[in-house]
Amino acid sequence: MTGSRRRFLQAAGAGAAAGAGLVGSAPAAALPGLLPRVPVRTGLDRLAASDWETLRGQRVGVVSNPTGVDREYRHLVDRMHADGVSIGGVFGPEHGFRGSAQAGGSEGTGIDARTGLTVYDAYGATQEAWARMFTAAGVRTVVFDIQDIGARFYTYIWTLYDSMCAAARLGLRYVVLDRPNPVGGKAFGPMMTAGYTSGVGRKEIVQQHGMTVGELARFYNGEFLPAEAGRRVHLEVVSCHGWFGRLRAGDTDLPWVLPSPNVPTPDTAIVYPGTCMFEGVASLSEGRGTTRPFELIGGPDFDYRWGDLVNSYGLPGVEFREAYFTPTFNKFTGRLCAGVEVKVTDQAAFDPIRTGVAMVVAARTFPAFAWRVDGGARPYWIDLLTGSPRMRTMVDAGAPTDEVVGAWRDELAAFEARRRPYLLYSRPGS
């Protein structure tokens, strides 16, 4: 062995030893890649371990999609069916029960090839339609198991809401098998307002709600169902063990199953509550049709100067890499787009919605910028995503990022206080 190679290996060994010492003493946030992942048991894990005790002797309807799996990737419905639980029907949300449909699509009503069970197309279903499907399936208990990603405009939480309202009206029992919120337990962003509710925001919650689906179900049941459904639903949440609000998807030992076709990784989920706002910008692609949706943002009429401008803001926990991509579907199919790749460098410091606002503020200074206009009484899609026209009008008026974000400070604080009685898990600072 040469002297230089020996010195190199000795230095590498010393570095490894020093690193090993750090792992034992550093906080988890400092060295996330070197620390063991936190073991977490989902609601499904816990219910299956009880041999489905709370469901035995009942006819059950299951609201789920491909994310409803255990750590061996066995699906809830397949396991229940094999174990003799009586399933009256399965209800598929956006993208379908088995996940074969793209954004804004579903699989239709039919027979599941694996189990022979009837699968009802529930995407976009009204509460009345939910009630008809539950009645047709003859169910007395509804089980919900879907991985949410923590953003108000991610439609699964409104599948949860409308199906809960229908179950309440019919006097059914509703069981939520809880899963962690992959973007953590902190809330960010503006409040939905009554005049701008839609399928991407049915009720008054903030843009990144920071709650698990079990906590949201409790919140809905206490805050909204008595007025809308006439009464609360008989709700049971089978909680997670081991999760708390500082943990994100990459911090736990749970397997990741993409919850929709354009959220392939936990990294996508982290940025989604902010960069999904680019759905509301006609001149910029949100990266659909690429391998990094919601992380790659750009358009045919933009260039490196946009990324340089956003980087100059010094936003915490994030950098913007100059990037070029050609979408294979959705906006600008087959056209070269210039823009940025959003690179989160510190998840604890990263505010996805403030980051998204800053990117929009910077993009608005370019002549090519244009909002998406869909027509109708509420023509701007960005207003439905953010909950009101406020962000759009402030950006158009030239307001800086801090002013835009400051406009929702009080309503965010009020929401955090309102949700507190319904939380099941500890939060940062609690």
Image: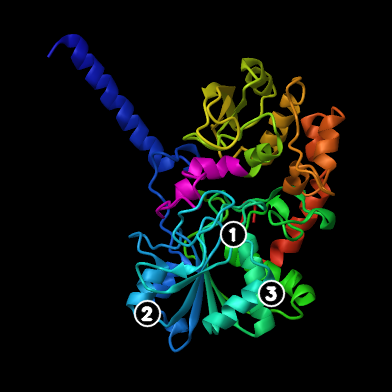
The outermost residue toward the right is 397
Q: Position of residue 317 (x, y in %)?
A: 59, 33
Give neighbour class at mark 3: few <14, some 14-19, many 20+ (Cα, 10 Å).
some
Q: Nearer the viewer, mark 2 or mark 3?
A: 3
Mark 2 vs mark 1: which is more N-terminal?
2
Question: Which residue is label 1 attached to?
Answer: 156
Question: Which residue is label 3 attached to?
Answer: 128
How far apart marks 1 and 3 lie (CA) works out to 18 Å
Q: Position of residue 308 (x, y in %)?
A: 64, 17
The outermost residue toward the left is 1
Q: Image point 33% across, 60% down: which residue?
A: 72
Check residue 81 for magenta coloring: no
Q: Image point 79% across, 74% down: which residue?
A: 227
The front one of 376 and 195 is: 376
Mark 1 vs mark 3: which is more N-terminal?
3
Question: Which residue is label 2 attached to?
Answer: 51
| Amino acid at circle 2 | Asp
Q: Nearer the viewer, mark 2 or mark 1?
A: 1
| Amino acid at circle 3 | Glu
Which range of residues does the magenta coloring cover? 249-272
Give neighbour class at mark 1: few <14, some 14-19, many 20+ (Cα, 10 Å).
many
Q: Position of residue 183 (x, y in %)?
A: 56, 48
| Amino acid at circle 1 | Tyr
Q: Image point 66% across, 39% down: which residue?
A: 279
